[in-house]
Image: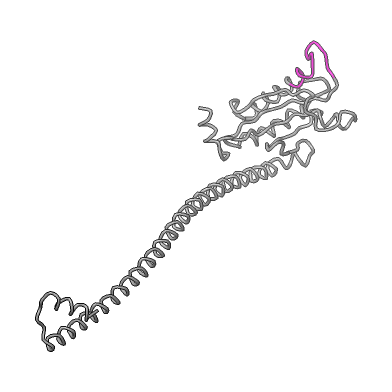
């Protein structure tokens, strides 16, 4: 190649001496060497650039993966925070229910202690019925057969009950009259509904006499419709003839009452 270049110079009419020829040949050889070195360096740079580009692509993939993972973690954290809040709300509601249950248990035990004398005498029984505290008095102790007039002993028993109920603040009491299934049909009491109602009202009046505020009292008749025993035996009929004094729960103290009140409005 060098010879061709020198010959091209000669053909162009240039006068070149042997010494000059040698110098040119040396310079050309050096130039070719430099070109070869630059070419190698260029190739090395291209290879390095390709490697860097591959590295950048890999890093971009890693960054994208990390960003996706971060997004997933943030989503998981939001779900976890929501779950924690729900759990805390559930625990708070359970704590409120437990507090209410403890208060009702304490109230029940207090009633048992206050009515111990009447309970021991067989004149009174205290039960929990459908989540309500109920004082049960057999009507055979309170009334004569087919009558709504309290006996002397019955009136005293109701007055004894009233002395305790009057000390229970912020509670209402509903007196419920119950009969057995033997029908009654008299001028005064055309049905068991009338007899049970008259007996409940008589007990309400006596509780009022005993000091229970009248605005905390109510009367109801259930006749023979809620038996607690069979009506096929004498003992069962006696159990069904009863007066129940229900301690009405204060719904405003129950968990969820505020939400129910808002819904009603």
Image location of residue 138, percent across then percent down = 79, 31
Callout count: 0
Magenta region: 183-196
Residue situated in front as seen by the camera: 167 or 76? 76
Left or right of residue 182: residue 174: left
Image location of residue 35, percent across then percent down = 24, 77
Does residue 190 belong to the magenta stretch? yes
Residue situated in front as seen by the camera: 37 or 107? 37
Left or right of residue 6: residue 118: right
- Residue 23: name its quadrant: bottom left
Residue 71 higher or lower than 162, as above or below: below
Residue situated in front as seen by the camera: 256 or 163? 256
Residue 65 higher or lower than 118, as above or below: below
Left or right of residue 14: residue 262: right
Residue 136 higher or lower than 223, as above or below: below
Image location of residue 246, percent across then percent down = 68, 32
Residue situated in front as seen by the camera: 168 or 132? 132
């Amino acid at each position: 190649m060098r010879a061709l270049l020198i010959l091209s110079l000669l053909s162009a009419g240039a006068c070149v001496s042997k010494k000059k020829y040698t110098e040119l040949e040396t310079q050309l050889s050096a130039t070719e060497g430099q070109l070869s070195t630059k070419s190698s360096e260029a190739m090395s740079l291209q290879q390095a650039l390709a490697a860097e580009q591959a590295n950048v692509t890999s890093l971009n993939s890693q960054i994208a993966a990390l960003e996706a993972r971060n997004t997933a973690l943030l989503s998981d954290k939001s779900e976890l925070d929501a779950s924690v809040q729900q759990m805390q709300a559930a625990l708070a509601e359970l704590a409120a229910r437990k507090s209410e249950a403890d208060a009702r248990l304490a109230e029940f035990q207090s009633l048992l202690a206050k009515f111990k004398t009447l309970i021991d005498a067989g004149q009174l029984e205290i039960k929990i019925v459908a989540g309500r505290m109920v004082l049960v008095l057999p009507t055979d102790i309170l009334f004569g057969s087919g009558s709504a007039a309290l006996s002397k002993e019955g009136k005293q028993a109701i007055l004894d009950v009233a002395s305790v109920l009057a000390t229970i603040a912020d509670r209402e009491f509903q007196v419920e009259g119950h009969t057995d299934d033997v029908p009654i049909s008299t001028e005064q009491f055309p049905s068991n509904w009338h007899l049970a109602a008259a007996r409940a009202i008589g007990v309400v009046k006596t509780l009022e006499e005993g000091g229970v505020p009248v605005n905390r009292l109510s009367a109801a008749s259930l006749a023979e419709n809620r038996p607690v025993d069979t009506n096929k035996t004498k003992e069962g009929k006696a159990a069904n003839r009863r007066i129940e004094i229900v301690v009405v729960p204060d719904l405003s103290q129950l968990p969820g009452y505020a939400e129910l009140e808002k819904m009603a409005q």
